Amino acid sequence: MSFSGGSYEEVARWLRNFLISHAKREDPRVEILLATGDERQGRSYGARLRLGGRLSPLWELDYKDVADNRGNLAWARGMAEQTRARARALTQIGVAGAR
């Protein structure tokens, strides 16, 4: 069974769950905001991580790239690392601001 491909909505659900699962490994309070509005439909996703009132920079993800590679372990590992790095950056802002 292959996990590559899928409709825009199916891939969006997978992507949201994937991002959440890896971001929360850094801090369980991190949330994912995934933009899938009309201007993006069938083309891209815009992802941001949120921790309290802090937001990560917008992360542009191409629908075809995610759909074609979500079953690729090396690609998924890279996405997981990027997600965790973004989550860590949000948590570090909070730590730096508390000093």
Image: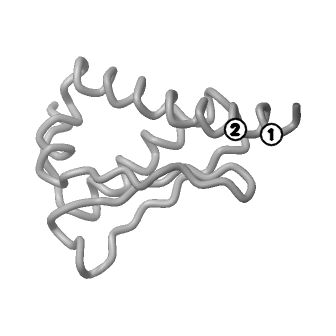
SS under mark 2: helix
Q: Position of residue 65 (x, y in %)?
A: 14, 44
**Circle 1 — which element?**
helix
Q: Residue at x 17, y 46 (%)?
A: 67
Q: From the viewer's perspective, is residue 99 above or below residue 55?
A: above
Seen in the picture, residue 46 relative to 79 is either above or below; the reply is below
Please report the residue visible at 21 percent of the width from the left and 62 percent of the height from the top.
8
Query: Which residue is denoted by mark 2 in the rendering?
Result: 93
Image quarter where the N terminus lies is: top left
60 and 30: which one is in front? 60
Q: Position of residue 86 (x, y in %)?
A: 51, 36
Residue lying at 76% horizontally and 39% vertically, measured from the top left: 94
- Amino acid carrying label 2: it is Ile
Report the residue at 43% width, 60% height from top: 34
> How far separated are the C-alphas under marks 1 and 2?
6 Å
Q: Residue furthest right?
A: 99
Residue at which label 1 appears: 97
Which image quarter is the C terminus in? top right
Is 61 rendered above or below residue 68?
Answer: below
Q: Marks 2 and 1: in contact by CB < 8 Å?
A: yes
The image quarter containing residue 37 is bottom left
- Where is residue 40 shown, x and y percent of the image? 23, 71
- Please tell me which residue lies in front, 36 or 13: 36
Type of amino acid at the residue the image marks with label 1: Gly
**Residue 66 appears at what percent x and percent y?**
21, 44
Q: Callout 2 environment at 10 Å: few (<14), some (14 to 19), or many (20+)? A: few
Locate residue 50 relative to residue 70 in the image: left or right: right
Tag shown at residue 77: none
Q: Does residue 19 appear to the left or right of 70 in the view shown?
A: right
